[in-house]
């Protein structure tokens, strides 16, 4: 591969995963992250199935993830009086292993920080793609030119906006919002037992409130058209939640009192990225992870990110030019994302009608839900090339 200097935007999961593989294959890697430091804590993410395990094993981080895994959380749906209505098994929501997003990012960061350049507290302001490279301007640092640029900067990707166009052209709002508030107990008491936990969920039409468990101290999910609020302002996000849940009973009034005590509050839309018409790459720029194929709370997002990073780095390592590598990456990930499904967590967890809530509870208590759990265990199995072996064979010859 002739293109050796690369810039990755984003240091959450997809970015450090991509940095690991590109560095391993001999690329000079720079990662830019708008946050002032690596983000800790955050909601729990999970991995499921042989394909995810294949990549994590080859990264050498499976044991590290196991050591920092959260407990499996069973979600019990209750009425205003606290009576149990249905149970959603943590084996369904937590995959084979669950870990806090910040802990996962830290594991990958430690794997790459000595060999890769990290620029915290900065972001890309402009991209100019030329025949010889990408001229990159930053919000704060001096401009630089890279052979390739990767957008691993999430569902609200700056790289996607600069390269492909406005967010509204590629991100579809699915009719719900979600909010995680309060650090997971595992980020507060890292030495505590990480086994099975229980969260308690309360529904009214179009709204869900969950308290407890290992993912976060509180979770909210509600139906709404696109909202006008400041995603960077914690106070504004608290305001939206308090207004939305002001008339809900049960444990919710207590939860709304507690939310003022939490520094960690994150509110965002449940949305899906659709790049089918234009693809995941353009010129010398490529999207990886949620920026390319994000589906909020769809169940496979983190796995898609690490697999996508593995595939695009591997294709670059075994092909002589980025054009061929990018085309192969796009084709592989289009097929894989189809297997990952097109779920809408908002419609399932926060049905808009009382009848919808009853039907959901019936489904959770039925054998159909058990059969669906078994199906999802195998649905996303996907055979990947062993790029390390291919690279070694190429060097040998």
Image: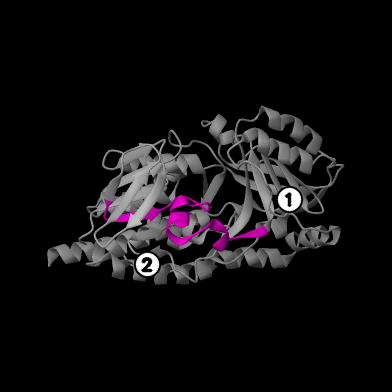
Identified at 85% across, 57% down, the residue is 354
Identified at 72% across, 30% down, the residue is 258
Q: Which residue is mark 1?
A: 222
Asked if residue 302 is positioned above or below residue 334 in the image, the reply reads: above
Tag count: 2
- For residue 54, say whether it is visible: no
Left/right placement of residue 203 relative to residue 181 reads: right
Q: Secondary structure at mark 1?
A: strand
Asked if residue 228 is positioned above or below residue 129 in the image, the reply reads: above
Q: Position of residue 79 (x, y in %)?
A: 84, 47
Q: Which residue is mark 2?
A: 329
- For residue 37, say whether it is visible: yes
Q: Which residues are magenta?
A: 146-174
Q: Which residue in the rendered view is the most extreme toward the top?
A: 261
Q: Secondary structure at mark 2?
A: helix
Binning the other alpha carbons within 10 Å of mark 1 as few (below 14), some (14 to 19) or many (20 upward) gives many
Left/right placement of residue 72 relative to residue 24 reads: right
Q: Position of residue 387 (x, y in %)?
A: 29, 63
- Residue in the foreground of this view, choosing between 5 and 373: 5
Where residue 376 sits, quadrant-wise, is: bottom right
Find out whether residue 21 is within the magenta segment. no
Q: Earlier in the sequence, mark 2 or mark 1?
A: 1
Left/right placement of residue 130 relative to residue 397 reads: right
Where residue 343 sits, quadrant-wise, is: bottom right
Q: Position of residue 373 (x, y in %)?
A: 62, 63
Give the spatial CA distance, label 2 vs label 1: 35 Å
The colouring scheme, among rainbow, by chain, secondary structure or one colour, is one colour
- Residue in the foreground of this view, choosing between 149 and 64: 149
- Residue in the foreground of this view, choosing between 391 and 263: 263
Q: Position of residue 247 (x, y in %)?
A: 85, 41
């Amino acid at each position: 591969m002739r293109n050796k200097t690369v810039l990755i935007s984003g240091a959450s999961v997809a970015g450090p995963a991509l940095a690991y593989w590109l560095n391993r294959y001999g690329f000079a890697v720079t990662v830019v992250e708008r946050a002032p430091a690596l983000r800790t804590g955050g909601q729990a993410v999970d991995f499921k199935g042989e394909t995810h395990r294949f990549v994590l094993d080859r990264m050498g981080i499976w044991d590290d993830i196991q050591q920092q895994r959260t407990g499996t959380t069973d979600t019990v749906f209750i009425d205003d009086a606290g009576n149990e209505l249905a149970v959603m098994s943590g084996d369904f929501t937590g995959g084979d292993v669950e870990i806090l997003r910040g802990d996962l990012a830290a594991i990958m960061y430690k794997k790459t920080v000595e060999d890769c350049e990290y620029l915290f507290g900065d972001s890309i302001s402009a991209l100019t793609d030329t025949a010889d490279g990408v001229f990159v301007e930053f919000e704060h640092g001096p401009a630089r030119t890279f052979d390739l640029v990767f957008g691993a900067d999430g569902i609200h990707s700056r790289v996607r906006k600069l390269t492909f166009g406005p967010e509204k052209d590629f991100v579809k709002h699915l009719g719900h919002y979600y909010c995680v508030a309060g650090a997971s107990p595992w980020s507060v008491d890292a030495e505590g037992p990480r086994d099975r936990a229980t969260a308690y969920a309360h529904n009214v039409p179009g709204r869900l409130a969950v308290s407890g468990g290992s993912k976060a101290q509180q979770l909210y999910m509600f139906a709404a058209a696109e909202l006008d609020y400041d995603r960077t302002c914690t106070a504004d996000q608290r305001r939206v939640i308090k207004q939305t849940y002001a008339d809900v009973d049960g444990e919710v009034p207590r939860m709304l009192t507690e939310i003022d005590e939490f520094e960690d509050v994150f509110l965002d839309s449940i949305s899906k990225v659709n790049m089918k018409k234009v693809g995941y790459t353009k010129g010398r720029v490529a999207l990886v992870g949620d920026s390319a194929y994000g589906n909020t709370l769809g169940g496979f997002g983190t796995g898609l990110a690490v697999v996508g990073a593995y595939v695009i780095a591997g294709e670059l390592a075994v092909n002589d030019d980025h054009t061929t590598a990018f085309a192969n990456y796009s084709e592989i990930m289009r097929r894989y994302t189809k297997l990952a499904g097109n779920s809408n967590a908002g419609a399932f967890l926060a049905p808009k009608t009382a009848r919808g809530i009853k039907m959901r509870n019936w489904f959770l208590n039925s054998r159909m839900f058990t059969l669906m759990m078994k199906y999802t265990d195998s649905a996303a199995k996907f055979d990947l090339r062993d790029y390390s072996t291919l690279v070694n064979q190429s060097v040998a010859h």
